[in-house]
Image: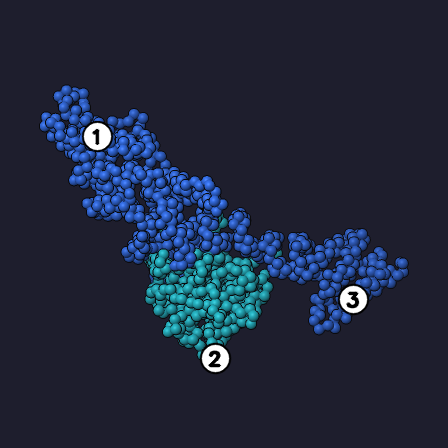
Chain colours: A blue, B cyan
Amino acid sequence: MSRVASDTVGNGALVPFSEDTKDSLAVYPLHHGLAPPISRIAISWARGNSLRVSLFATPSSEPSRTPQDQSGGKVLEVKLGVGDPEISDSRWRQIAYGSVAPFALLQSRRSALSEMIKSSSPYQMDWWENVLEYSKDITSLLSGPKLPPGPIIEERTDIVKKREEPTCLKAAWELLEIFYADKQSQAWLPEKLVDWLADYDSLFSSTHETVYGKLARFQKELVDIQVLEDDPRYWEVMSSALSVGWLDIVVKMLRLHGSYQLDQLSNRELENGLVEAVAVLISKMPRLCHESTNGKLGELFKSKPDFIKAWEKWRSQITKLDCSPFWIQCGNHHTREGLRNLLQIMLGNTESLCMATCYWIELYISHFLYIRPFTTGIESMYNLAQKCIQLKPPSSNHKLTGLIVGILEENTEVVLAESSREFGPWMVAHAIELLTAGSEQAEIVLHDERYNLGGISMIELHRLVYAQVLSSHALTWQIAPIYLTSCMKQGMGLLENLLYRQSIQHNDLLLKNIEICRLYELDHISSDIMKVAGVYHWKHGHKGAGVYWLQQSKDTSRLNRIAQQLFDSVGKSISDESFKQWEGLIELLGSESKPAGGLEFLHKYRDFKRSLQQVYGGKATDAARQAVGSLILLMKNPSTPQRFWLPLLYDSLKLFNWHECPLLNVSETNLLLNKLQELSWARLHPHFSEPNLPAEALSSIRLALATNLGRAILDE
Amino acid sequence: MAKELLILDNGTTCSCWNYCGARLAAGSADGTVSIFDFCDSASSSSLRSSFKFKAHEGNVVKVVWVPPEYGDAVASVSADGVVSLWEEVAQDSQPTQWKFCKSFGSSSSKVLDVQFGTSLNSLKMVVACSDGHVRVYELLDPLELRNWQLQAEFQNVIESVSAFGKALCFSASISWNPQKGGSQESSFLIGFNSNTSELNSSKVWEFDQAHQRWLPVAELALPEEKGDRVYAAAWAPNIGRPYETIAVATQKGLSIWHLGLNPDHNGTLPVERVALLPGHEGMVWQMEWDMSGMTLATTGHDGMVRLWQSNLNGIWHQQAVMEPTA
C-alpha cells in the first residue's frame, strides 16, 4: 500500500538539518573571521544536537597588524535541526513545555487502555476520542495571541477580518486533525476543508496570489473608489470570495452596491432587486455541516437527505433567476455581468470557478462547494486534487501543499517526511499520535520495528529525535525524559547518556539529576553521577561533601582508599585544624564502610587523640587519666593494627612520664610491655614495615614504661 | 545558526571538551595547556580562561580529558610523543590549581594517541606508539592519578606470531566502547596509519579475564583492504541497538560497520560493512558520534565538517556540510 517515499522526500532524513535538502546537499557557511588558512578543525558533540567546532588558524610567526590576525582560532557552537524558522526560540520553548502535559496524558491513557484490554474489561472507550482531546489541547497551545478587537462601531467597508495571526504550524496541525484524529469529521471533510481554508488562505499569500490577498488589497483601495459597481475589480473580488465560499464577505460587499443608496433607490429599483435576489440566494446556500457555525451565512443541514433536497431547490432557484427576463431590463452592464458571473459560480461552472480562484487548493475547495457537494471518500478526493493541480499547475510550492498532497494520497511516510522537513521534530513527534489513530495501515507502518533503525519503530525514532533537540538546550533538556521514557527500546539508553552528560558542579542541577534518576529507576546512573560529584568535591578540598556523595553512591573502593588515607595519619603529629578535619571525616565515614574493622579502631583512636590533645593543652591529670584509658582500650582491642602500636605508644610518652603520679597501674604497664615484646618478635618477620619514628623511639618508650612500672609498684 | 563561544590564542593547536561540555582544554604550540570554563551563570554562553599550565617543552598535539569519575584531569600528548597527565586539585584550603601527576613515554617510541576507558571498575589508559605497540596502563588507586601500572603491551595484529620490529607509524586512532557498564568488561578499537600493513586495520580488543590478556575479537576491514591505512576510528554510543556501530576512515573513505554482539565459537564477533562513503578527499582528522549514535560528524583534509546519517531504509548518506569561511 504505502510506497517508500524516503528517497524522494526530505532524503528520509532522521534529523532534518535544513528546510531544504531535497535535491542538492546543503552547505552551511561557518563564519569565523580568522586569517586563512585554517590548519585544523576539531569537533565535539555537546548534549543533543549541538555540535561544537574548534577552528585553528595556521600559527603566524611574524607580528601581525590587526588583532583579528592574532587570534589563533575560534570555537563555534552550531545547533542543528531546531525546526521551523517561522517561530521564535522562546515561542518554541513555550510550545515544547505546553505540549508535555497533553502528550503525557495521552501516553498514560494508552497504557491504561492496554491494561484494560488485557483484563478484557467490557468497557472500552473509542481511542480516537482521546486522541482528539489531545489534538484539541495542542491546537489551543498553537493558537497565537488574539489580535486586538476591531473598533466597536464596525466600518461599513470593513470586509476582511482576522481573529488571530495564523501560522503554518497550526494550519498543518489542524489539517492532520481533520483527516486523522477527528473520526466524526470524516463525513464532513469537504466542509471542514472549506473552513480550514477560510482560516488559513492568507498563509499561502507568501508564495501565491490568493483570494485573501486580492480581498486585502481591494479593501485598501475601497475608500478611493467612487462608483463601486462600475469597477471590474469589485465584481472580480466578489466572485473570488464566493468561489471559496466566504458567503458573509460576498453578501456584505453586495450590499455596498450603489443601488442601495437611498437617493438611487427609485431609479435603480430593478437593478437593486437583482442584487438583493443574488444576495439572498447566497445567504441561503445550503451547507452540510454537523455543528452550528455560529453567525455564518448559509442554511445548515445535518442530514444528507435534507441537504440534498434543499440543495436541489436552491439550484433550481438559481437557474430560474439566471433565466429571468429581468436581466435584459437591467441597464447597468457591469452589474448585469457581475451578478450573472456570481450565478455561474453557484451553478458550478468550471470555467468561472477556474477564473475566480487563484491556485489549486482554492479551486479544489470551490469544487467541493459547487460541483461535488456530496463528495465523500478520500480516494475521490485525491483524484479531484490531481485534477485541480492539472488545471492550475503550481508555480512554486508552499510548505503546506506537500503535506496536503501526502494526506490525500494516504501516504503516511510522505506525511511524516513533509512534517519533519517543514515543521521539524516537534511536529513529527506529536503528530504521529494523530497518524496512528488515523488508520490501521498507518499504525502498522509506524509501529513496525525495523532492523535498519536498530530495531525500533518510526514512532520511537521520531521521539528520540525530538528528545535530542530538547536536550540541546539548557532550558528544555529537563522535559526530554518524558519523551524518552515513552520509548520502549532505546529511550532509556539515550536518557542515561543525557543524564551522564550533565554537569555536577551546580548542586541544584545535581539534585535535579538524581531526582530524575530516582523517578525512572536508573540507579546505576545516579550512582555514577554521585561518584563523579564525590570525586569532584574530594579533589577540590570539600572533603566532607566528597565523602557524603561517595557514600551515597556506595562506592566502597574509593571510601576504602579514603579510610586508608586516614590510617596514614595515625601516629603523625597533626595540627589542630587538620585534626579537626580528620576527626570530621571519621565521623562522616560512619560505621557503614568497614575497611577490615579499621573504622572501630579509628573511632577509638580519635577518642584517644582528643584526650591527648587536652593533656598537651595543659589540662589536669584527669584528662591524662582519660587518655590512658583510651590508650589501654586501643592496645587491648584486637582490631588495632599492629603497625600502629609503636606510634601510639610513642604518642603517649608524656603519659608514661607523668610527674605527679604514675598513671598506669602494674597490670596495665605489663600489658604495654608485653606488646612491646610482641613487636620485637614481629620485627624478625620479613614483611614488617618499620614505622616512621625517631631511632630512639623504642628505647625511650621502654625506659618510660620501666620507670612507670617502678613507681606503680611502689604506689601499690 | 553558529554562535561564537571563544576566541583562542595564537598558536593553539588542539582542543577537547570534557564529559558534560562545560570545560574546554586547549593545547598550544608553546607546550601550554589552557582550561576554559563557562562564566558562572548556567545559561551564559561565553567561556573564559581559568587555568594555564606548561605541560611540555614542545608542541602539544592532543589533549584528552580523563573520565570524570577520576576527577578533573587531562592528558596531553606532545609532538615528541610524551603523554603528560595533570589534574585539578585544591588541598588544605589552598586555591584550586593544576598539578602534574605523571608522564608516559620513552625515547625509543613516540605516543601517537591516548584514550581512557573504564573496565571492571578501574581506569585504563590505552596508548598507541609510533613503533606499532599498544600499551594498556591501569590506575591502581582510584583517587590517585600518580600510580599507574603497565597491564599489557601488544601489537595491533590478529596473529601475534612475529613482532614487527621496524614498524613506523604516523598516526593512530583509539576509540573505547562508550558503554558505561561499571563492573562490565570493556573493549576498545584501534587502527594505525603506518608503513606496516599488518598493523593498520582497525581491530577490536577485549580483555580475556580467564587468561588475563587482551584479545582481538574483530577486524574491521574487508579481506582485500586490510593493509589500508586508518586515519580515524569512532565507536558509536549504543542506546539499545542489537549491534554496535563503528565508523572507520581510511584512504578509501569512511566505512560504517555493524559489529554483532554475540561471538562465534572462536570468540570472534561478526562484522558487516554497511556503507562506504566518500569522506574528505584525504586525511580524516576526527570523527565524532552524537550521544544517540545516529549522526556522525567528521572533519578532515578538505577543511569541511560533514554530517552523516542513515535514512529509514538503512542507507547511509551525507546529511549536511559545514564550510568554514572568513
10 Å crowding of disc 3: few (<14), some (14-19), many (20+): some
Q: Residue at x 42, y 44 (%)?
A: A96
Q: Is there one chain holding both mark 2 and mark 1?
A: no
Reading the image, the residue beneath label 2 is B162
Residue A188, quarter of the rendered image: top left
* Inter-mark Cα distance, 2 to 1: 99 Å
Q: Residue A676: which disc?
A: 3
10 Å crowding of disc 1: few (<14), some (14-19), many (20+): few
Which chain does the residue under circle 1 lie in?
A: A
Disc 2 on helix, strand or loop? loop
Q: Residue at x 40, y 66 (%)?
A: B272
Q: Residue at x 37, y 54 (%)?
A: A14
Which chain does the residue under circle 2 lie in?
A: B
Which chain does the residue under circle 3 lie in?
A: A
Q: Residue at x 68, y 54 (%)?
A: A591
Q: Are marks 3 and 2 in contact (CB under 8 Å)?
A: no
Q: Is residue B15 visible?
A: no
In x, y percent, where is residue B22? 48, 54
A452 or A251, which is in the foreground?
A452
Reading the image, the residue beneath label 1 is A313
Between disc 2 and disc 1, the foreground one is: 1
